[in-house]
């Protein structure tokens, strides 16, 4: 507290001195009392210099405070939406976030990938709104996912935990507008043999990129976003097929497909993904870099909404089908005529 007060006193010291000097000049200097043109020019120059100095001083102080706030926001963002590891249980992973607020380090999107005994589990979500106002909701959902992904045997259990965590957060932090807050969410599980399962709550379905081309995986209608309606009694997962060796799964928030250029044209996400897939190996970092650059170019560096992107590429050796983990028992399911395969942790 003493340090803060000291900085405030030092910050006010120079403006006070300049102001006192200007007032003293006006009241006591004989030149300031004269009315001829030369005296007026001198007096005007003195006050102009004082005013310019004050403006520059205030600007410098505000810029220093802004840089400090950005450092704090960046540290908070890194602690919450921490950088993903480049490799998770044999899968190559990369992610990026583009904020709608110029210079902002905090957005309303969330993502995470963790290796569990049930397979690699990923979440991609989009909180209503963006910026600092959505930060608390992102923290509540991400914190719950990082625990539930390891504790729950199936994605339905993970989703119910997230729903309860969101409801508690909204009751505590947004009691007046809890009924208007929601989160779109996509949960994906990738088993050791490449089989993909998913649960979707109002979120865009992912794209699969491979040698055969790019296709959006949309096996069923999604559930409503979390927070708007209670979850149904049954939450069966839907299959997304297999992520073959060399293929990549591209997850995104709706800000990517809804981004517009200066003429109001939507970002051609599917076409850009197709061009990237046809242009070389599907490295996660390369795909993320190409899509991020294309989005920033399309929106002139200022997307209208927060955008989160994530790519999971399969760099595992080609597995035997049916060697995935049985989610009902938590044990490996042996392939016919082969010993059980144990997934990496």
Image (cartoon, helix red, strand yellow):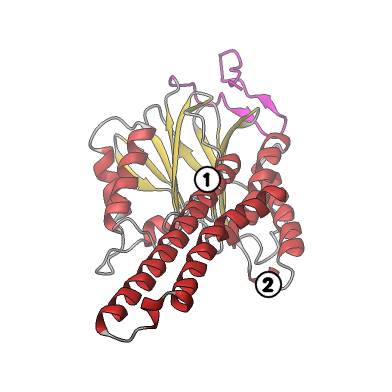
Disc number for residue 217: none
User: Which is in the foreground here, disc 2 or disc 1?
Assistant: 1
Sequence-first tag of 2 and 1: 1
Nearest the viewer among 202 and 319 is 202
State the image coordinates of residue 320 (x, y, percent, origin top left): 49, 21
Do we see residue 28 in this rendering? Answer: yes
Question: Which residue carries the number 1 mark?
Answer: 71
State the image coordinates of residue 141 (x, y, percent, origin top left): 65, 50
* Image quadrant in which you'd find residue 179: bottom right
What's the magenta region?
A: 317-345
Residue 261 in the magenta stretch? The answer is no
Q: Is residue 185 left or right of residue 151?
A: left
SS state under label 1: helix
Q: Is residue 179 left or right of residue 304?
A: right
SS state under label 2: loop
Residue at 51% across, 50% down = 70
Q: Quadrant of the C terminus?
A: top right
Asked whether the beta carbons under mark 2 and mark 1 sit within 8 Å of each other, the answer is no
Question: Which residue carries the number 2 mark?
Answer: 177
Q: Main secondary structure of the magenta part?
A: loop
Name the residue furthest bottom.
35
């Amino acid at each position: 507290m003493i340090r803060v007060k000291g900085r405030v006193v030092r910050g006010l010291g120079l403006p006070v001195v300049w102001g006192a000097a200007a007032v003293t000049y006006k009241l006591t200097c004989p030149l300031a009392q004269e009315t001829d043109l030369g005296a007026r020019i001198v007096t005007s120059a003195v006050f102009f210099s004082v005013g310019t100095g004050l403006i520059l001083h205030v600007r410098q102080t505000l810029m220093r405070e802004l840089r400090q706030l950005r450092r704090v926001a960046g540290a908070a963002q890194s602690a919450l939406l921490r950088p993903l590891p480049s490799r998770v249980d044999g899968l190559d992973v990369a992610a990026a976030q583009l904020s709608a607020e110029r210079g902002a380090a905090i957005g309303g999107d969330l993502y995470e990938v963790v290796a569990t005994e049930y397979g690699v589990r990923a979440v991609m979500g989009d909180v209503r709104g963006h910026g600092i106002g959505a930060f608390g909701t992102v923290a509540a959902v991400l914190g719950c996912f990082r625990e539930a992904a390891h504790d729950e045997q199936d994605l339905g259990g993970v989703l119910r935990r997230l729903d309860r965590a969101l409801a508690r957060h909204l009751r505590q932090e947004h009691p007046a507008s809890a009924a208007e807050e929601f989160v779109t969410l996509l949960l994906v599980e990738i088993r050791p043999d490449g089989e993909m399962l998913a649960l979707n709550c109002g979120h865009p379905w992912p794209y699969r990129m491979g040698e055969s081309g790019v296709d959006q995986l949309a096996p069923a209608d999604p559930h409503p976003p979390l927070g708007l309606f209670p979850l149904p009694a049954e939450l069966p997962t839907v299959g997304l097929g297999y992520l073959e060796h060399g293929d990549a799964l591209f997850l995104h928030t709706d800000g990517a497909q809804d981004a517009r250029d200066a003429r109001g044209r939507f970002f051609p996400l599917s076409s850009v993904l197709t061009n990237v897939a046809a242009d070389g190996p599907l490295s996660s970092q390369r795909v993320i870099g190409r899509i991020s650059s294309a989005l920033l170019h399309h929106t002139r560096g200022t997307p209208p909404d927060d955008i989160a992107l994530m790519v999971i590429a399969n760099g595992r050796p080609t597995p035997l089908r049916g060697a995935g983990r049985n989610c009902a028992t938590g044990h490996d399911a042996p392939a016919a005529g082969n010993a059980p395969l144990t997934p990496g942790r």
